[in-house]
Image (spheres, rainbow, N blue to C red):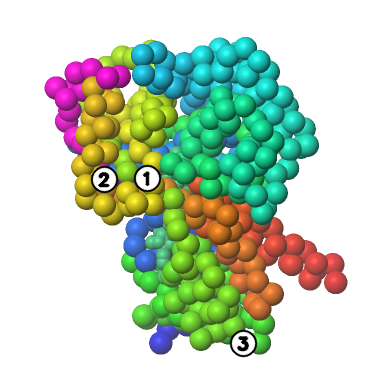
Amino acid sequence: MKKSHYDAVIVGGGLAGLSAAAYLAHSGKKVAVIERGKLGGRAMTIKLKGFQFNFGAHAIYGRDQSYLTKIEQELGLKLYWSDFTQLKAKYDLGDEVSVVPTNIGGLLQTKLLRGMDKFRFAYHIMFTMLGFEKGDPDVSIKEWLDGKKVSPAVKEMMLNLASTNFFTGEPERIPSDVFFGYYRRLFKTNIPVSYIQGGWRSLIEEFIKIIESNGGEIITKTRANGVTTEKDKVTEVRTKKTIYTADDFVFAIPPEELKELFSETELEKELEDYTDYEPTYVMFYDVGLKKRIDSQYTYIFDKDRQIFITDISYYDMEAAPPGGQLLQAVAYLKKEEVNNPDAYTDIKDKIEEFYDKHFEGWRKQLIVPRVSKTAVVQAIKWTMKQRGLPTSFPQYSNAHFAGDWCQGAGQLSELSFSSAYNSCQRILKKETSKQVG
Ligand SMILES: Cc1cc2nc3c(=O)[nH]c(=O)nc-3n(C[C@H](O)[C@H](O)[C@H](O)COP(=O)(O)OP(=O)(O)OC[C@H]3O[C@@H](n4cnc5c(N)ncnc54)[C@H](O)[C@@H]3O)c2cc1C
C-alpha cells in the first residue's frame, strides 16, 4: 500500500476541515485533506436553473466578534459581505409584524414588549453584556428564567431569540450557561447577521486556493476508514489505497464516524458518550422565483409555527439570476417531528401558507423548489444532556478535533470555525515551543 507523509493530515472537507487545512497550510505546514465525498460537507452550494442553493444557509452571526473574521483577516481571504438590515427583520404576530430586537435600537421599536418589559429585557441584555449573567451548567434556561421570576413577556422574548439563534423549536432545553455565553458575545456585535456574496462556495474556493498555493493536497471521494496509534500518538490514517502518516491530525468528521475510525483504540470508549448525540434538525423549503416579489422585510419569523423565511437573494446578489429571487424557509423541528411523514406534510403546508402570506404570488413565479424533509443544521443540539466534543483528549497528544459538534464559540458554522482555529493554534504552539526548547 502507498504511504505518504505530511506535517498535518485533515480528515473531513467540510467548513471545519477546510478552514483548519487552509490555516495550517498558510502557516507553512504541508497538509493533506481527505474527504469521502465532495468538498463543503453541509455547506455545499448547488446550482439549479441559474439559482445557487446553499444546502445550509450562509448567514454569519455576529461577524465582527467571530472566529471566521479572525481566519479571514489572518489568511487574507477575499470575501465580500452583505450585512443584514435590522429594520427589515420582523416577527409575524398574526395581525401585525414587529421588529426583531437584536440590539437596543430594535428593542425600542419592538411591539412584542411593552412598558416596563422593555426595561426588564434591556436590563437582562446589559447584565449579559457585562458578563454578570453567567447561568449555571446544571440549570436549563427555562429553569433559570422560572427561578428568577422573569416576567412572562420577557421570558417569551428571550426564548424566541434563542429559537432563532440556536435553530431550535425547544429553546427551553438550552443549558443556561451556554445561553448566556452565546448572548454575551452576540449582544456586543455591531453586525448581528451577514451573508457572504456567492455563498459558501466563495469561502470554500478561497480555502482551496490557500491550501493548493501552499503545496497542500486535497483528496476527495476517499474515505478514511481507520487509524493506527502508538503510545500517546496517532501515527496513521488509513484509506482503501493509501496510508497517510503525519505529525498532527485534525479530525473534522462527525462523532459517529469518529467512533468507527477510533474503534479498538484508547478513545473508543470515550467517544461512545458523544455518539448518541441528538442533532438539531430543521426542514428547509427554498424557492427560486422568476421575478422578484418585493416585501418590506427580508427576514420574517413566525414564532408560533417556528418557521422563518429569508430573502437570500436580497443579500447575496449571486444567488438568483437577474430579476429573479431566491427565498429560503426554515422550520425548526421538534424531536417527535423528525422523520415523521405526517409532521412533514403538515409543516410543508404551513410553510407554503407562510409564503402565501408574505410573498403573495410566489407560486406563479416558481421555477425551482428545493425541499428537504430533514436536515442537520447543527450536529449537536444544546440540551442539559449534551455537551460539545472536546477538541483534544489526553490519550493522543497529536489528535485534534473540529466541527459543529465540538466545544467552541457561537453556534452553527461558528462552532466549526472556532474549534478548527483552536486546534490549529495548539498544533502551531507545539511547533513554537519545540523551536524555543
Ligand atoms: C438547512 C441548514 C441551514 C443552515 N444555516 C446556517 C446558517 O445560516 N449559518 C451558519 O453558520 N450555519 C448554518 N448551517 C450549518 C452549517 O452548514 C454547518 O455548521 C457547517 O457546514 C458544518 O461544517 P463541519 O465541517 O463542521 O461539518 P460537515 O459539513 O458535516 O463536514 C464533515 C465532512 O466530513 C466528511 N466525512 C465524514 N466522514 C468521513 C470519513 N470517514 N472520511 C473522510 N471524510 C469524511 C463529510 O463528507 C463532510 O464533508 C446550516 C445547515 C443547514 C443544513
Mark 2 to mark 1: distance in Å? 9 Å
Find residue 184 and report its horizontal and vertical position in percent: 68, 37
Disc 2 and disc 1 in contact, CB within 8 angstroms = yes
Q: Is 357 left or right of 414, judged from the image as shown?
A: left
Find residue 311 and report its horizontal and vertical position in percent: 36, 25
Q: Earlier in the sequence, mark 3 or mark 2?
A: 3
Q: Which residues are magenta?
A: 357-372
From the viewer's side, name the closer residue of 124 and 223: 124
Mark 3 to mark 2: distance in Å? 49 Å
Residue 100, relative to residue 247: is it above or below? above
Q: Residue at x 53, y 79 (%)?
A: 268
Q: Earlier in the sequence, mark 3 or mark 1?
A: 3
**Residue 333, disc:** 1
Residue 253, relative to residue 329: is it above or below? below
Q: Quadrant of residue 427?
A: bottom right
**Residue 343, disc:** 2
Q: Disc 3 vs disc 1: which is toward the camera?
A: 1
Q: Residue at x 56, y 24 (%)?
A: 153
Q: Residue at x 74, y 38 (%)?
A: 133
Judge the density around disc 3: few (<14), some (14-19), many (≥20) Cα neighbours within 10 Å. Answer: few
Mark 3 to mark 1: distance in Å? 43 Å
From the viewer's side, name the closer residue of 393 and 239: 393
Regarding mark 2 in the picture, which secondary structure is present there? Answer: helix
From the viewer's side, name the closer residue of 154 and 88: 154
Q: Magenta stretch: residue 358 in it?
A: yes
Amino acid identity at mark 1: Leu
| Disc 3: which residue | 230
Q: Quadrant of residue 73?
A: top right
